[in-house]
Image (cartoon, helix red, strand yellow):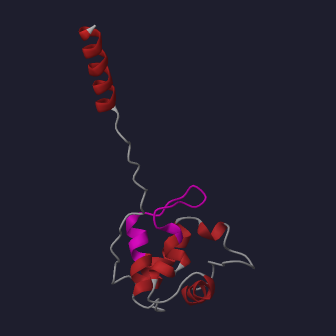
Amino acid sequence: MKIKLLILIAFVFVTIASCTKDIIEPKLAPVIPPNTSAKFSTDVYPIFANNSCTGCHGGAGGLTLTGTPSAVRANLLLSAVIPNSSVTSKLYTFFNGTSHKNKSLTTSEVSNIKGWIDSGALDN
């Protein structure tokens, strides 16, 4: 009887000891340092053509990403960019850690967008 009790206690102990609570860490967007020397005309504007953004965002209505760099910048400032605040700008938060139409921007491209916005979203 004592052996059965010891086996039962050992079984309970092993069962309890083997139970662990799985901790699921939330997936956070990567921390991307800004490229503070990013210029719109050379570092941000080409991203739209290189990633085929203009295929869907090239016509009237919604966000238009075609035209001169100054025109595209003006369109972004209307709905997607808040100068000096990448964390509240749709353009940055949209691509920071996510994809759109199965297309993700590179870390360098996201860094350029972040740096340009945080530097005032200048027309440069």
Provide residue 58's location: percent of width, then percent of height.
Answer: 68, 74
Q: Residue placed at 32% from the left, 24% from the top? A: 12
In the displayed image of the protein, which residue is found farthest to the right? Answer: 60
Q: Quadrant of the C terminus?
A: bottom left
User: Looking at this view, is 27 or 107 the one in front?
Assistant: 27
Q: Quadrant of the N terminus?
A: top left
Is 38 covered by the magenta stretch? no
Vertical position of residue 1 compared to residue 86: above or below:
above
Q: Quadrant of residue 108?
A: bottom left
The magenta stretch is 94-112
Is 96 covered by the magenta stretch? yes
| 105 with respect to 31 (left or right) | right
| 30 with respect to 90 (left or right) | left
Q: Residue placed at 54% from the left, 84% from the top? A: 81
User: Looking at this view, is 92 or 72 the one in front?
Assistant: 92
Q: Quadrant of residue 53?
A: bottom right
| 75 with respect to 12 (left or right) | right
Provide residue 33's location: percent of width, then percent of height.
Answer: 32, 73
User: Looking at this view, is 37 or 23 the one in front?
Assistant: 23
Q: Quadrant of residue 119?
A: bottom left
In the displayed image of the protein, which residue is found farthest to the front? Answer: 1
Q: Residue placed at 39% from the left, 65% from the top? A: 107
Vertical position of residue 53 compared to residue 81: above or below:
above
State the count of labels. 0
Vertical position of residue 109 compared to residue 84: above or below:
above
